C-alpha cells in the first residue's frame, strides 16, 4: 500500500468514523433534530435507536484490526443507510441540500472501503 493510499484511507476513515459516531449517538439518544427529520421523512421514531446502535457498532468494526468479514458488513450497512437516507430526502421532495450530509458520508464510506489495507480485506477466493 502506497503512502498516499494509506493517508487517503485514514483521513476518509477518520471522517467516516466521526460522522457515523456523532450521528449514531444523536440517533440513539434521539437528540440533535433527528426526531423531526425522521418524522418529516415518514419513518417511525424507533428507527433512530436501531440505526444509532448499529452505526456505533459499525464504527467499532471498521476501526478495530482484523475481522475483515465484519468490516465488509459494516461498510455495507453504512452504504445502505447513507444511500437510503439520501434517497429518502430526495424522494419526499426536500431540497437537494438536505441530502448532502448523507451523500458526503456515502462518499467517505466508498472511499474508505476502496482504500482499506490488505489486512482489512477479505482474502481472494481461489487464488492461483
Image (cartoon, rainbow, N blue to C red):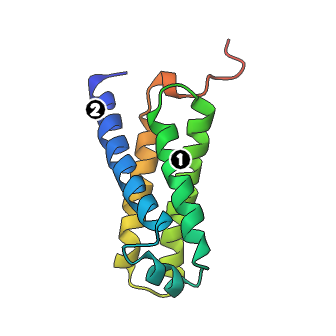
Total marks in image: 2
* Residue 24 picture location, percent across and down: 46, 59
Residue that numbered label 1 is attached to: 57
Compared to residue 46, the image places residue 9 above or below, namely above
Compared to residue 124, the image places residue 105 above or below, namely below
Residue at the top extreme, as displayed: 128
Compared to residue 124, the image places residue 49 above or below, namely below
- Mark 1 burial class by Cα count in 10 Å: few <14, some 14-19, many 20+: some
Query: Can you say which quadrant of the picture contains the C terminus?
Result: top right
**Residue found 49% across the figure and 62% down from its top:** 82
- Mark 2 burial class by Cα count in 10 Å: few <14, some 14-19, many 20+: few
- Secondary element at tag 2: helix
Query: Can you say which quadrant of the picture contains the N terminus?
Result: top left
Circles 1 and 2 in contact, beta carbons < 8 Å: no
Residue at the front extreme, as displayed: 29
**Foreground of the two, 65 or 79:** 65
Is residue 2 left or right of 57 when viewed as pictured? left
**Residue found 45% across the figure and 80% down from its top:** 37
Disc with the residue nearer the chain's start (1 vs 2)? 2
Residue that numbered label 2 is attached to: 7
Amino acid at each position: 500500500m502506497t503512502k498516499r493510499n494509506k493517508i487517503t484511507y485514514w483521513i476518509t476513515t477518520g471522517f467516516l468514523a466521526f460522522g457515523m459516531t456523532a450521528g449514531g449517538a444523536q440517533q440513539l439518544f434521539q437528540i440533535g433534530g433527528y426526531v423531526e427529520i425522521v418524522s418529516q421523512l415518514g419513518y417511525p421514531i424507533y428507527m433512530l435507536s436501531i440505526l444509532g446502535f448499529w452505526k456505533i457498532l459499525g464504527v467499532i468494526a471498521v476501526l478495530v484490526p482484523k475481522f475483515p468479514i465484519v468490516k465488509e458488513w459494516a461498510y455495507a450497512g453504512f452504504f445502505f443507510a447513507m444511500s437510503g437516507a439520501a434517497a429518502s430526502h430526495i424522494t419526499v421532495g426536500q431540497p437537494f441540500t438536505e441530502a448532502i450530509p448523507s451523500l458526503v458520508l456515502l462518499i467517505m464510506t466508498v472511499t474508505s472501503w476502496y482504500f482499506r489495507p490488505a489486512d482489512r480485506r477479505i482474502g481472494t477466493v481461489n487464488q492461483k
